[in-house]
Amino acid sequence: MKNDTIQIARSTILWFEAYHPNHPEVLLVDYDPDELELDVAGNFDYEISDDNLRHIYIDLETKVVPYGAIFVRSDFEFELNGDTWDDYFTHDFLYPMVKLSLQESGDAFKEACEEEQITLPRDIPVQDKFIISICESVIDLYFTIFKPYDLANAELRNTIAFDCPQCNAAFITMQGTFLVIDEIIYHNPLFNRKHNQHVFGNYVPLMKYNTLRAKCMDIVKHPVKLSSYNTILFYTCVDCAMQMLLGDKSDILAIACDARGMTSEVRTLFYRLATELFDMVYKNPDQTQTGMADQRAMHDWNALFK
């Protein structure tokens, strides 16, 4: 397989945070103010999209103490050509993708700092130790966890369970769901976002959440089809957003929602539409929907999140 034409199809900044002098990440590190204390954590996801392209997503969280942190998803796409996923999860193939992702993250961090009027002492370096470490982690996770899971759950992953047309109800339900969860796990400093990412990831793995979010937010461009697997994750997300908007942290979320256009009136409509979705689950108890109902009964999101 040739990999000399690898390039990023698109990149998305999922969040950026500027650090202040008393930020916990700054206080935890003994740093030289004239240097860049750099740490990078990587994750990944992959899928074959509706337009029959292979996609590999590299998610990188880059911390640069004492300046800030950024989370960037880089999307690489490939034509279907008879290869298997095993052919893509090799060191030689992943190395240039991870390197490009690191470069993209560094450039995005620099631009975000410029917008915040933060001056960096130098450019963000692309360090080989991070590339190698991320490649090794991705390959290990693919062969030990992702591939066996995909084989065991092929029907869930390949069967369409939710075919959502473009309509006002879909716009409100999908956009509202991810707006709320993004506040809880990514954006709002009044939440313990690291804790919330961890507990949420126990039910909706964050890399799968990022993929699902992008897929659902495309409802503004075209109808959305979700596999049985993604449908279960989506209903878990809807349930999470509903509970949090009605729970003991609703005041925090109400302020954030108002600022982003999800007003009290829109939230009331969101509750009604989301409730109608769950009514359909209970009235049509096939295997996928029964799984969604069982999952919903397990979660007390207000107790889990901080």
Image: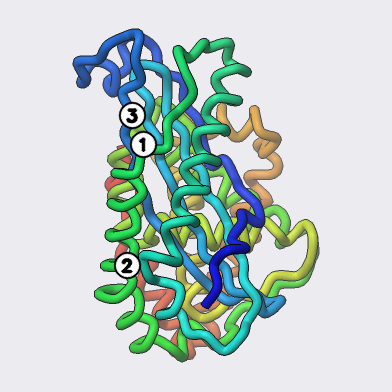
Q: Position of residue 290 (x, y in %)?
A: 42, 82
Q: Earlier in the sequence, mark 3 or mark 1?
A: 3
Pointer 3 with pointer 2, Cβ within 8 A? no
Q: Secondary structure at mark 1?
A: helix
Question: What residue is at 27 percent from the left and 20 percent from the top?
Answer: 24
Residue annotated with mark 2: 139
Q: Position of residue 201 (x, y in %)?
A: 34, 55
Compute the Cα span from label 1 to label 2.
27 Å
How many tags in the picture? 3
Q: Is residue 129 left or right of residue 249?
A: left
Q: Is residue 186 left or right of residue 192?
A: right
Q: Looking at the image, is 167 positioned above or below residue 150?
A: above
Q: Nearer the viewer, residue 92 or 280?
A: 92
- Residue 38's disc number: 3
Three-letter amino acid code of the residue under disc 2: Ile
Three-letter amino acid code of the residue under disc 1: Arg
Pointer 1 with pointer 2, Cβ within 8 A? no
Q: Position of residue 221 (x, y in %)?
A: 79, 60
Q: Secondary structure at mark 3?
A: strand
Camera-side mark, 3 or 1: 3
Q: Nearer the viewer, residue 59 or 204?
A: 59
Crowd rating for badge 3 (residues with CA inside 10 Å; few <14, some 14–19, many 20+): some
- Residue 193's disc number: 1
The answer to which quarter of the image holds residue 121 is top left
Q: Earlier in the sequence, mark 1 or mark 2?
A: 2
Residue 251 in sight: no
